Amino acid sequence: MNNPIWIMTSAFDQLDLDQTIEKAKEAGVQGLDVCVFRKDGTRDDFVATHMDYENFSPDTAKEMIEKFNRNQLRMSLGAFDNLIGGDEQQKINNQNHLLRLIRMAHLMGGDENDIKVGTFVGYNHELGVQERGFQKNLEEYKKVFEPIIKYAEDLGVTILYENCPMEGWRSAGFSSTYNNLPGVLAARKLMYELIPSKAHGEIYDPSHDVWQHVDPTEVIEHTDMGRLKRIHVKSTRNGNSPFWGNMYPMHLVEGELAKKAGVPTSQHEWDRHHYEATLPGFGVGDNMDWRKFINTLKAKNFSGPFEIENEAALSKGTGNMGAIMQGCKATVLNLAPLLWELTEEGYAYKGEQNPLKDLNRKDVPVVTMKELK
């Protein structure tokens, strides 16, 4: 096993793509998962737009391939929003944006260059509060994603779901913190049964299962490895609450009442569950056995990249570029003896870093969901 380590570019929202590439080289990684969020989107947490999706052409694709090859980096694309619920117009905008990213990936070689497109699915809470609401969300997922996946398959592109439940995506006044359908393994397995195409798979982030008190190694044991293309590297240090327990989220309570009762209450939408986002090897321990997890992936012959998603409170959370880079570098050093060969220079990546192929793809028009249906 000699897996590459990449960085997800959301950590560098302060920088442009060229500056982010320089940071990647400084950190000693082999690729970037390039965030390309909508500029007019509704999210304001851990988002970045590092490619111009509005004016992307075959010439742009050629330029990107040359840029990444020049810097000896591989890449993927991603934007993570709600595609099956929420405000109707925003939902449609998010669906159409995913179609743009699929086209971009195709122009840059798609699966032939291992350029995948990351996405969320989201959740429809109007359906979710009804009896059999989870089943109805699965059906809504199929209705929305079946044409999207067919489009991706036709263009030779694979889309990947990330498993964050997005627990802070709605006001702390709501009781449920399950806001992204693929947030549990059961959902992902059901999704693949509903749409059997090989043109969709997953990016697995173990940290989300850790605070749900699920062993990520057990998740891998039950995962279809043909679907698993990326691993997000992010840790979790669990807390606990004698007041709220660890089965349900902390709820929003009227402040004066909570104060009189001596009960903690949510201070903002992300203050629901009891954990701290961390990076392995940087400043604080976590509740995950990374060696056990990686050894299980080795045994299952996982060959994809490990992508550092820096949302750590002590790193990205500081807003300090020095701390952001320290977190990334510490994570590379922490993973190196688990992933890379021991050489005279220490543990070093010795895998094949094949350049991206310039396939001279002809242009394809930008399409919308209305045109696909």
Image (cartoon, rainbow, N blue to C red):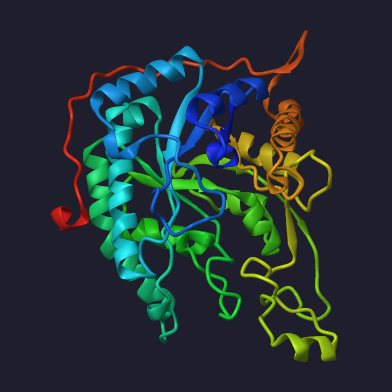
Quadrant that contains the N terminus: top right
Tell me: residue 339, above or below residue 138: above
Quarter occupied by residue 296 = top right
Residue 239 % position (x, y): 80, 64
Quarter occupied by residue 144 = bottom left
Residue 113 % position (x, y): 37, 25
Residue 136 % position (x, y): 36, 75
Tell me: residue 281, above or below residue 82: above
Tell me: residue 292, above or below residue 134: above
Residue 300 placement, left or right of 182: right
Quadrant that contains the C terminus: bottom left
Residue 273 visible at all: yes
Residue at 34 percent across and 56 percent down: it is 94
Closer to the camera in the image, 203 or 291: 203
Residue at 23 percent across and 19 percent down: it is 360
Residue 302 % position (x, y): 55, 35
Residue 301 visible at all: no
Residue at 23 percent across and 46 percent down: it is 151
Quarter occupied by residue 258 = bottom right
Closer to the camera in the image, 322 or 31: 322
